[in-house]
Image: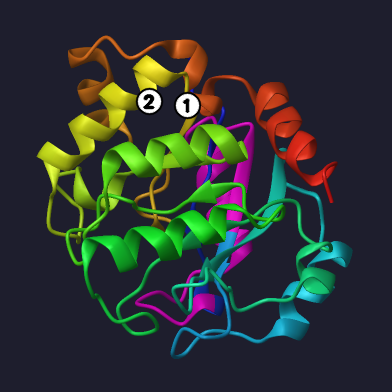
Amino acid sequence: MQVYFDVHTHSVSSGHHTKDTITDLAKKAAEIGLKYLCITEHAPAMIGTTNASYFRNLRYAPKERFGVKIIYGAELNVINQNGDVDLDGDVLSCLDFSIASLHKDVFKPSSESADTAAIINAMKNPFVNVVGHPDDPTFSLNAHALTDAAKETSTALELNSAGISKSGYREPNIPFLVEMLYLCKRKGVYIVLGSDSHGKDRIADFDDSIKILKAIDFPDELVLNYDIQLFKKFIGDKRCKI
């Protein structure tokens, strides 16, 4: 199966460890044969990132660069156990989609019940389409409750390269990840592949992620990166509920 896009990337606007611009990312995406590229800067609660006006104005940004179609999103921060995120609906409506993630600089790790409740409540937001790096070992999530909520709320779960790839920067949490993927397979929960690349160098760094999917015979039809039209429909269907 061909990977058509990377769902999770950051440019210099996220303020973390890169000087690469969206143009740099798009050029690299074109070089490696991607048809689409999702740009998902960190939302404002993260230290050093950009502000709400930046995201509001992305609706005017170029939709194609170097032959690569650009999908503009945000990596939202879940800020409390109620699942609130750090961009309002009027800003999120200007974006194509969004990822919601737990980050320790914004949401302090607590208990399994509290961490899981925060993510599940965030998934109820009709603008939240993807849960970012649910395997981050900084937090304790209940894989059964997580996958049940993903199915109920039409939210995809991310297979994030940063905790899997040999060049990744997050501590691996493979046992949780495999459990989550088996549950997704059993329940029919969609996943997405995201590099979480800060800059151009790790865009579509999916080799190790795909090895895991093959090892557990994960269904291709549940991987949204293999079907851009299904990805767009998946996002649109949830937003239609607003």
Task: Kindly report the distance in space between the C-alpha atoms of the residues bearing marks 2 and 1.
Answer: 5 Å
Quick check: marks 2 and 1 in contact, CB under 8 Å? Answer: yes
Q: Residues within 10 Å of mark 2 (few under 14, many from 20)?
A: many
Q: Position of residue 117 (x, y in %)?
A: 41, 61
Mark sitting earlier along the chain (2/1): 2
8 relative to 187, above or below: below
Residue nearer the viewer, 84 or 67? 84
User: In terms of depth relative to the viewer, which is nearer, 26 or 80?
Assistant: 80
- Please name the residue shown 46% across and 78% down the image: 80
Say if 106 sits above or below 207 in the image: below
Give the residue at the far front of this rendering: 113
Numbered circle sitting on residue 184: 2
Going by the numbered disc 1, the residue's amino acid type is Val
Q: Position of residue 174 (x, y in %)?
A: 13, 40
Horizontal arrangement in the rendering, residue 218 relative to residue 33 (left or right):
left
Colouring mode (rainbow / by chain / secondary structure / one colour): rainbow
Indicate the quadrant where residue 93 lies.
bottom right
Label 1: element kind: loop
- Disc 2 on helix, strand or loop? helix
Residue occupying the point 31% across, 25% down: 183
Magenta-colored stretch includes residue 27: yes
Left or right placement of residue 160 versus residue 153 in this view: left
Would you identify the image quadrant in which residue 89 lies? bottom right
**Residue range of the region highlighted in magenta in the rendering:** 14-39
124 relative position to 189: left or right: right
Look at the image and say whether residue 241 sits in the magenta stretch: no
Query: Which residue is painted at 71% across and 39% down in the image?
Result: 235
Mark 1 Cα shell of 10 Å, populated few (<14), some (14-19), many (≥20):
many
Residue found at x 39% / y 57%: 197
Which residue lies under the disc numbered 1? 189
